[in-house]
Amino acid sequence: MTLRRRHATCMAKWQNTKGRGIPPGAKQMKSYCMLFAMAFSAMSMVTALGCGDESNKTVSDLDLTPDTSSMKKGETLQYTLKVMYSDGSADGDMSGDAEWVSSDPATATVSADGLVTAIDEGTVTITARYGGEEETESLVVLP
């Protein structure tokens, strides 16, 4: 499990060393703080990596902006990734938490936070992936 800098408290999976989940009816902590605690007993060790009441949120949609279809060779363009969740809530800029991919790095590259640099003429698809979803934008690099 990879914990990212945002919403790590919502991504915790609770279990003991025997691989059993926390039993139904157990009290759940409802805070938005990171909790790093260990409890030891003769039978098992429990590690709490996070807590929160947003653990049932799933990504329902992504929105990539700006909606730019072309740029000139040598220019840069900063994409912003907005994430919408199944409960209707949203996070504004998750660009730094997404996985970014350029279909043709010889035409345009994309950095880990969504900054596109136009290298050479051609057409390229930029993809942002987050929470099991992906959003793409097609760009034409002009001379």
Image (tube, rainbow, N blue to C red):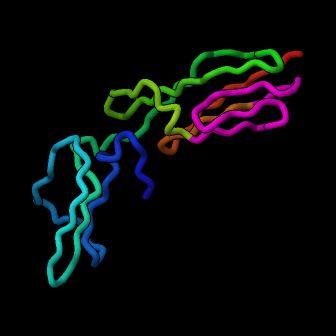
**For this view, does 54 lie left or right of residue 82?**
left
Total labels: the figure holds 0
Please identify the quadrant where the N terminus is shown.
bottom left
Q: Which residue of the protein is positioned furthest toward the bottom in this rendering?
A: 42
Please identify the quadrant where the C terminus is shown.
top right
**For this view, does 11 lie left or right of residue 134?**
left
Q: What percent of the width, then of the height, locates residue 142?
A: 85, 16
Q: What percent of the width, then of the height, locates residue 54?
A: 27, 41
**For this view, does 92 lie left or right of residue 41?**
right
Magenta region: 99-124
Q: What percent of the width, then of the height, locates residue 37?
A: 21, 61
Residue drawn 84% across and 35% down? 106
In the rendered image, residue 94 lying in the magenta stretch gets the answer: no
**For this view, does 113 lie left or right of residue 106?**
left
Quadrant location of residue 134?
top right
The foreground one among 115 and 131 is: 115
In the rendered image, residue 113 lying in the magenta stretch gets the answer: yes
Residue drawn 10% across and 59% down? 25
119 is higher (above) or lower (below) than 50: above
Quadrant location of residue 84?
top left
Residue drawn 25% across and 72% down? 16
Residue drawn 47% across and 43% down? 131
Q: What percent of the width, then of the height, locates residue 15?
A: 26, 67
